[in-house]
Image: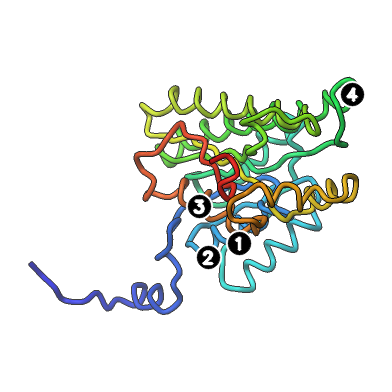
Amino acid sequence: MDNTPDTTPETLTRAATGVGLGLLADKVAFVTGAGRGIGAAAARLFAREGARVLLAARTEAQIKAVAEEIRATGGTADHVVCDLADAASVRAAVDRAVELYGRLDVAFNNGATSHQPGPMDQFPEADFDHVYAVNLRGPWLAMTAEVTAIRATAGTGAIVNNSSVGSLMGNPELPAYSAMKRAVNSLTESAAVTYGPEGIRVNAIAPGATITEMIREWEDSSPGVIERITTQAPLRRAADPDEIAQAAAWLLSDRASYVTGTVLRVDGGSRA
């Protein structure tokens, strides 16, 4: 066996910079809701782990800033405006990843919207319809487009949907949000069964309390909610967005090659 070290310029450069040596080395990744919170943390992490990343969200200023930050630190990233409630916008955003990078390998469907906490009988019908359009129909549209792109380019790949630990129990404060996330779990499992024979894995993560703009807004309307939630978790704290992104990165990577159809709790043990 030839044990001579590979000293080609490309290999030496990759070794010196760490590029191409991570969990997602040489993969093309698409991330929704990438302008802030968990999505932004995921975009940064995926790039550090060697992926070429396309960031998607409605607010261009946010995703542009994160993409520029990634490029400034040596990563590869671009951005595309995407409204998860608009089918054409979702399909165009996924197609953009293929246009830019030649293929699609992995996708993290993180984008979502929340709603004013309160009992379901006080929840306006229009608000329910909006949460449905973004949090359930949006991931369905995204998965459909992503499977098509992966199938046509990389051939095999992986998708992770961002659910919520609230999808695993009754949630009287956020009933519509939790209902849509529970449905996302079902879509995840159905997609895993449908596309597994093609080599496309589909999983979900179910984060617990995570310090993002969404939970800060919930805290503003319901003071003390963060403390109440975190005291129920054995780790006695909320997660940092990067901790949730790490779970998504692993599920998208080849190291999780025999994992599909699962909803992975990343909740500090709150459902233990």
Q: CA distance from mark 2 to mark 4?
A: 40 Å
Q: Residue at 65% of width from left, 34% of height from top?
A: 91
Q: Disc 2 or 4, which lies upstream in sequence?
A: 2
Question: Dot 1, how many residues are within 10 Å of its Cα: few (below 14), some (14-19), or many (20+)?
Answer: many
Q: Which residue is mark 1?
A: 44
Q: Which residue is mark 4?
A: 126
Q: Residue at 69% of width from left, 31% of height from top?
A: 138
| Residue farthest toward the left in the current orientation of the protein | 1
Could you tell me which secondary element the residue under label 4 belongs to?
helix
Which circle, 4 or 1, is nearer the viewer?
4
Could you tell me which secondary element the residue under label 3 belongs to?
helix
Q: Disc 4 or 1, which lies upstream in sequence?
A: 1
Which residue is more in the foreground, 53 or 176?
176
Q: Which residue is mark 3?
A: 249
Type of amino acid under label 1: Arg
Q: Disc 3 or 4, which lies upstream in sequence?
A: 4
Please state the horizontal and vertical placement of residue 166, each as a whole percent of the image.
Answer: 67, 35
Which residue is more in the foreground, 227 or 75?
227
Q: Are marks 2 and 1 in contact (CB under 8 Å)?
A: yes
Q: CA distance from mark 4 to mark 1?
A: 34 Å
Which circle, 2 or 3, is nearer the viewer?
3
Please state the horizontal and vertical placement of residue 122, each as a whole percent of the image.
Answer: 92, 24
Q: CA distance from mark 3 to mark 1?
A: 11 Å
Q: CA distance from mark 2 to mark 1?
A: 6 Å
Which circle, 3 or 1, is nearer the viewer?
3
